[in-house]
Image (cartoon, helix red, strand yellow):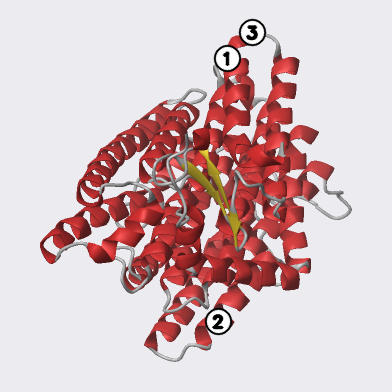
Amino acid sequence: MSTHLPILPVLLPLLAGALLLLMRESGHGARALLAVLATLAQLGVALLLVAGTPGSPDTPTSAGIRVYALGGWPAPFGIVLVVDRLAGFMLSLTAILGLAAMIYALARWERAGSHFLPLFQFLLMGLNGAFLTGDLFNLFVFFEILLAASYGLALHGSGRMRVRAGLHYIVINLVASLVFLIAAALIYGLTGTLNMAEVAQRMPQLDADLRGLFDLAVFLLGLVFLVKAAAWPLNFWLPATYAAAAAPVGGVFALLTKVGIYGLLRISTLFGQDAAPAPFQGEWLFHFGLITLAVASLGVLSVQKLDRLAGFMILLSSGLLLAAFGFSGTRLTGPGLYYLASSVLGGGALFMLVELAERNRVPGNDFLAVSAEAFGLPDGEESPLAEETAGVAIPAAMAFLGLAFITCAVVLAGLPPFSGFVAKFALLRAALMTPGPQAWLFFAALLLSGLAGLIALSRLGIRVFWDRERPVPRLQLLEAGPVAALLLLCMLLAFGAGPALVWFETAATALHDSGTYIRAVLPTDAGVPP
């Protein structure tokens, strides 16, 4: 069974989604049980792959890299799935966030429209396949699978705003898919292969007259990944789309931008940060990241609604990751991966928490609750909204929401003692060990973006939780549990920061060793199987 572990993250959600389509919509209990068990199985497989289960002659390993040849045809003749530390980490993160969002959706959102659970499984299948594949064409195929599922999930439920934002999201990604297909066709025509390891191997061998066309093809491919990563100026669609989506959908969408960042990081390290064509070069990624950070910081300071703020916090994390992964050398890659885990878990929890916090609120109460303080009242005059609060107990639901929101704010803004602070401190420390203007630019951008996030989260959090006119929202365990679990993981990530950072540093070192990856995928004795 261990021989076929790498294919299970693709097969499990595929089979679960197909079975869910065949089951009757009225059988909520059986459908929910199947979906949860399938996602738990994906998490178990991902953790086994991270742990590095022993390989076999059919699945060669090299320096922790495991290659699975579909149909027994080795690369470059066949399609391969490649599991290294980065791929295993992304699989685990996908399963954790997917499980939390799915359990949250079972409380009420799963019944707000048709086929939520199968679409969710197909989304997980596309994500897992994108992280595993070693082939550009199959990366395109898995992109299309996850995007097709995300279209349905983005439109899940009802509402004009959801439909309008969802249609914008669909159009943008359809155009990006067309560009991806054109780029892949050009790369295949020039190199004769779409295997990423073989493309990296053949790139230096191209004639000078073909290299310009190859660079154009790679540039188009990079634009596609920048759209997926929500880099400026290709990220205008994200805040509205994520804010309009259902809460569990927005939660799992926190991971979608990281697929683009994964693609940029994977190809940049395979080609070499200095040798890679634009925009995969480190300098390009660094400056895209800085500009995205600046625009997202202005966005978080300008928004007046929590759901849109959550979307801009995703843009902040994307900008910071792009800048970190584009930084000269490899010092920031390990801390960047640690930050990726923290931001995905915290961002996913925030999207689900926003819906709970905004439930049963009367529009406009947040403004009225702070207007007296904002505009000032004469001494001794009481605000018309003021009530006697001495001795009033905080209801359990409001206590949970308040503490959870504070934890989210601390994690995402990068304050101690949680994982966001550890991640940003590790990034700053690594950046300052490399002298030069690039380090100081990164230092300033990281601190200022964190300050902007803290101000915005504090301001809107006060408005929401200062609203004393609202009825206390009723929370279900299926809703509060996933939010609490994601935040608990952020705490555990901080408490285990030492071993976690060592693991991520090892993953970063292996990632930048492109020669080992190429040798693992393209063994010198590979031949056509009988």
Q: Which mark is residue 24?
A: 3
Q: Position of residue 129 (x, y in %)?
A: 51, 40
Residue 288 lies in quadrant: bottom left
Q: CA distance from mark 2 to mark 1?
A: 49 Å
Q: Which mark is residue 335?
A: none
- The amino acid at mark 2 is Ala
Q: Nearer the viewer, residue 477 or 130?
A: 130
Q: Residue at x 46, y 80 (%)?
A: 444
Residue 265 lies in quadrant: bottom left
Q: Quadrant of the N terminus?
A: top right
| Mark 3 and mark 2 residues within 8 Å of each other at the beta carbon | no
From this view, report whether residue 391 is shown above or below residue 320: above
Q: Is tag 2's residue or tag 1's residue first in the polypeptide sequence?
A: 1
Q: Which mark is residue 21?
A: 1
- The amino acid at mark 3 is Arg
Position of 510 with respect to 26 (left or right) is left
Q: Residue at x 67, y 49 (%)?
A: 55
Q: Position of residue 506 (x, y in %)?
A: 62, 70
Q: Residue at x 72, y 47 (%)?
A: 48
From this view, report whether residue 4 is shown above or below residue 56: above
Q: Position of residue 24 (x, y in %)?
A: 64, 8
Q: Secondary structure at mark 3?
A: loop
